[in-house]
Amino acid sequence: MTPGEAQPRHFRAFAVQPHWSAGDFASAEAFRAWLRGQLELARPHLALDRPNLVVLTELNGLPLVLRGVPLAVRAGTFERAALLLFLRHLPRALPVLLRERVSPIRALQLALSGENARLYLETCRDLAREYGVYLCCGSAPMPRFRLEGGRVRRDPGVLHNETVVLDPQGDLIGVADKVHLTPAEEAGGVDLTPGPLEELRVFPTPVGDLGVAISLDAFREDVILRLEAGGCTVLLQPDANGAPWTDLEGLPPDPGNVRDQPVAWLESSWQVTTRGRSIRYAVNPMVVGNLLDLTFDGQSAITGRAEDAPEPRSYALTEPRPGFIALLPWVEEAGPERLRAAGRERASGSGHPWENRYRTGVLHADLTLPPAWLPAPPRTPHEEALSALLRGEVAWPRRGPGWRAVAAGAALLGLVWSRQRRRR
């Protein structure tokens, strides 16, 4: 086909804003039902005459570590849950901790990564096929896999916050790892591995030349410039904002720049699309709900150029402006002080009658882009392994309990304990 014969790309984009709770991750069945519910929200609006792109939220696979441990689901705080989970999975987590020299929280996640990655990715694959959509799965803690001698191996110690994008047949389009981690994702929190900036690529599809900037990455100029240089026309920004929406925010790398969170959010996808460079549209879904003792809130949006959405509107606590093609309203409309109080009332542990009561929903917009002429980027070894796993061409990696390492670790703990007793 010559450029003169190519047709514009017409497609429909969706941003799903779900409510989550620890119980949604208590079992494989609960997780599948929770994720399916998000596609069901989109189902009545799916276009029949054009392809559909559905974008889910950040770290929607992280709480799978709770699966199968009812005490952790009811622990009340993530700190207590993490301790219960590590003790419950000690025979599997301790060998990883000793062998790969990682923190207990990363060892726990890596020890469970085979089953959790399989559940997460196969659920997303099946939903993409069933609903016939291009699916940005959100993101999840994901190890780095590779094919070796016809088998899949996991690289030691590596655990990214990773987005996976699938086509309507459930086949892999590509992955993207979060480059700029928040403090809660670093060593003092869930202890993830920053993604390499140079591995971010753009994926040409019928629903846009897709570039992914997970949450904080969409605020960072180095990420946006790289995606623009690669020809990105549709930015995907899966998000999980771990604070009341109307709180104050100081984002790294300048935590001293404190302002209302919605004001800070204008510096991500809205700013990217309205400044008029290659990125024409952005889809930014945000999860809401109190997950144990953590609060998540926000306003999902689809943004574009000012001429795409001339009607003035904006996030809570900000002045109306063009560029919002679709925007989910927040829970209230009021003056600044009342909005800040409303955010605190819904936060975890508030004790208020409105605690954990947030707005959920789905946004959609019909978008148009010129024909795609970008070549698809070559696949990484990790993508080759994921593609083979999703197609069922290779088996998912399994790791035994490592009883020798457990025995060695137990002996080491016993030695430390006996020495402490002698010192008393």
Image (tube, rainbow, N blue to C red):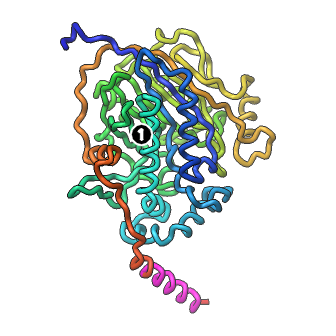
**Residue 95: image x %, image y %?**
41, 71
Q: In this view, does 258 lie to the left or right of 278?
A: right
**Residue at the bottom extreme, as displayed:** 422
Label 1's element?
helix
Q: Which residue is drawn at 60% across and 47% down?
A: 24
Q: In this view, does 153 lie to the left or right of 258?
A: left
**Residue 282: image x %, image y %?**
45, 24
Q: Report if residue 317 is visible in the image.
A: no
Q: Residue at x 66, y 59 (%)?
A: 75
The residue wearing badge 1 is 125
Q: Report if residue 123 is visible in the image.
A: yes
Taking depth in this image into account, of 193 and 291 the one nearest to the observer is 291
Residue 392 lies in magenta, yes or no? no
**Residue 262: image x %, image y %?**
59, 29
In which quarter of the view is residue 88 placed?
A: bottom right
Residue 420 lies in magenta, yes or no? yes
Image quadrant for the N terminus? Answer: top left
**Magenta-colored span:** 408-423
The amino acid type of the residue labelled 1 equals Arg
Q: Is residue 366 above or below residue 219?
A: above
